[in-house]
Amino acid sequence: HALGVLRDGVRKVTVVGRRGHIQGAFTIKEIRELTKLKKEGLDVSFRVSQEELDMGMTEASLAELEGAKARPKKRIDKLLREAAVASSLVIANANEREVSLRMLMNPVEFLPSETDPALIGSVVCERTRLEGKAGEQSAVGTGEFETIPANLALLSIGYKGLCLPGLEGSFDERRGTIDNDHGKVSGEDSGGLYCSGWIKRGPSGIIGTNIQDAKDTVAAILTDLEARALTKDNDTGSPRGRLGLDTLLKERNTRVVNWESYAEIDAAEKEASRLRAEGQPREKITSIQDMLSVIS
């Protein structure tokens, strides 16, 4: 697994974005956690370039910072600029662990390691500039290149939700999300259908954001359950809710992992014989077939 690749640990992480920080999908919570790495005793520095922040401040970017809905972006801009000033006052140490946030850099080529051609050695990035109107800016190459040393490259090209068949009337193609009211899918023909997570609000946030998001959707489900809005038969006469789901799974001959079965998997992962070190809470079972094999 990943341990074989990471070996002695990670010394430096460089997060590269093709556009500027104003166009980033990250949240203030995510950036704040990066700025606190050193303070939390993790001995990891966070670095961001004041020059790259300024390069992304086109007239269109300034326009994107206007209006009531732009407040989160303004807070991110302020936090990153404070971090840029703080990092500029600290002399870089080659042996120090570091997380760098780079803007207006487009990866264009992976180069092999000089010692082992089967491994990556560096990433070639092209400097970009922003073009377009507010809300629709794109990254355009400038012909200027920079090579960043790397032993591992992880691709993150973004996320956009896709419409499921039958949801065309409730899907926002531009945002890639399902129109909803606190998780309850909008539309006349979508009774009993709910959504949560990125398909509900778009690709942003951290684990805590998803928890609150899920609670919001569950509250909508409970409200409908109390109003008995989910127990009525639909046009086909099939039952809704849990009974309808159980019936459908049985018709499809689908093997179900219920709560009791999950508890068996949970217990198996915590078995002392599986643990690699003292104090380790569990050793995850990574194969679905292996998970199913421990269920009685």
Image (spheres, rainbow, N blue to C red):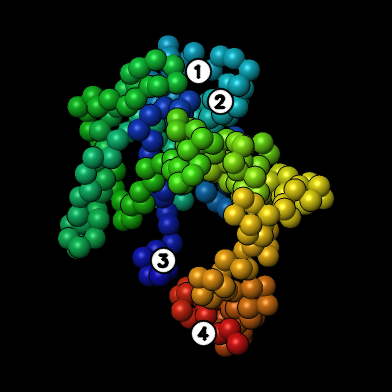
Mark 3 burial class by Cα count in 10 Å: few <14, some 14-19, many 20+:
few
Mark closer to the chain start, 1 or 3: 3
Provide the secondary structure element on which disc 1 rests: helix
Q: Is the C terminus in the top left, top right, bottom left or bottom right quadrant? A: bottom right
Mark closer to the chain start, 4 or 1: 1
Mark closer to the chain start, 1 or 2: 1
Whether pointer 1 and pointer 2 mark residues with C-beta atoms closer than 8 Å, the reply is yes
x 54%, y 43%: residue: 198
Which quadrant would residue 91 be assigned to in this image?
top left
Q: CA distance from mark 4 to mark 3?
A: 24 Å
Q: Which residue is mark 4?
A: 293
Q: CA distance from mark 3 to mark 2?
A: 34 Å
Q: Is the N terminus in the top left, top right, bottom left or bottom right quadrant? A: bottom left
- Of badges 2 and 4, the one in the foreground is 4
x 20%, y 50%: residue: 111
Q: Which kind of residue does numbered mark 1 sit on?
A: Glu
Q: Position of residue 220 (x, y in %)?
A: 73, 45
Which quadrant would residue 104 be assigned to in this image?
top left
Which quadrant would residue 57 be assigned to in this image?
top left
Q: Which kind of residue does numbered mark 3 sit on?
A: Ala
Q: Position of residue 14 (x, y in %)?
A: 40, 44
